[in-house]
Amino acid sequence: MKERLQKVIAQAGLASRRRAEELILSGRVKVNDTVVTKLGCKVDPMIDVVSIDDHVLPVQEQKTYILLYKPVGYVTTVSDPYKRPTVLDLVPNPKRLFPVGRLDINSEGLLLLTNDGTLAHLLMHPRFGVTKTYEVWIKGQLSADKLQQLTTGIQLEDGPARAIKVSLVGSWSQGSRWKVVMGEGRKREIRRMFLSIGAPVQRLIRRNLGPLSLGQLTPGQFRPLTKAEVVALYQAAGQPCIRHHSKITS
């Protein structure tokens, strides 16, 4: 879709709309190698090549955010050398999407697929404090001592691990279900923690990623995120939902 040239420059984050107009009028902007000096010019940023002082504007790839209920039996990778089904097999036309974080092949639940590398970094790095909430099924119950171990810390082979909060959700035919809130997501971390206290996990479902909820999705179902949900994820990491670029100087 064609838009005014000064608007395209401003949307790229390289200058304000007014500054972009000044750049055009001064002959510093080219469209497809042709100098443009009139403000009425319209361009399609996905087709036309726009440059300022012979520096090409970066193409602003459309960001995609998909919430997927990962079923058991799928690996959380873009491709698999063992030819196992991957989470991207569940989404038509996955383009250049990649999963944010991981769920092991035997686990299920909320998985975010996106091409927004900035958001993925914010959500995965524990420094930004975005929590992950899981439903953990075990046989039997947890004693008060074992509950305390989970929240005060357990020494695993790759370092200490602890849950932020563990609370009882309910029961199932062979035992109990627990809500476990984590501040990080190391490989099979929850399974290893529960195994270390003698309560191997029978079923593991990720229910929440920060403010994002699995909702009513069932295994294999997916939906796009709303704009409000994307903004909420950025805010959960303490960041505004904007793209940062260097400003053009005079």
Image (cartoon, helix red, strand yellow):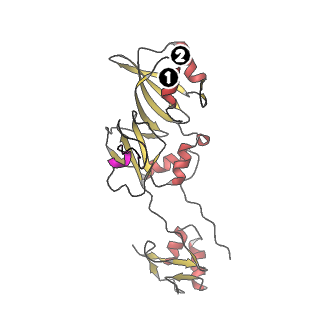
User: Can residue 78 be found in the magenta stretch?
Assistant: yes
Q: Residue furthest front?
A: 82
Q: Main secondary structure of the magenta part?
A: loop
Residue displayed at 55% across by 36% down: 184
Give the SS element for disc 1: helix
Residue displayed at 51% across by 26% down: 192
Q: Quadrant of residue 140?
A: top left
Up-down relation of residue 205 to residue 52 (above or below)? above
Residue with the mark numbered 1? 194
Residue 225 seen by the camera: no
Q: Quadrant of residue 111?
A: top left
Image quadrant occupied by the C terminus: bottom right
Residue with the mark numbered 2? 146
Quick one: label 2, few (<14), some, or many (20+) residues within 10 Å? some
- Residue 15 percent across, percent down from the top left: 60, 71
Residue 129 in the figure: left or right of residue 100: right
- Residue 132 percent across, percent down from the top left: 49, 36
- Residue 104 percent across, percent down from the top left: 43, 36
For discs 2 and 1, the disc positioned in front in the rendered view? 1
State if disc 1 and disc 2 touch (CB < 8 Å): no
Up-down relation of residue 184 to residue 3 (above or below)? above
Q: Quadrant of residue 236?
A: top right
Residue 222 in the figure: left or right of residue 98: left
Give the SS element for disc 2: helix
Amino acid type indicated by mark 1: Phe
User: Can residue 180 be found in the magenta stretch?
Assistant: no
Mark 2 or 1, nearer chain start: 2
Magenta region: 76-89
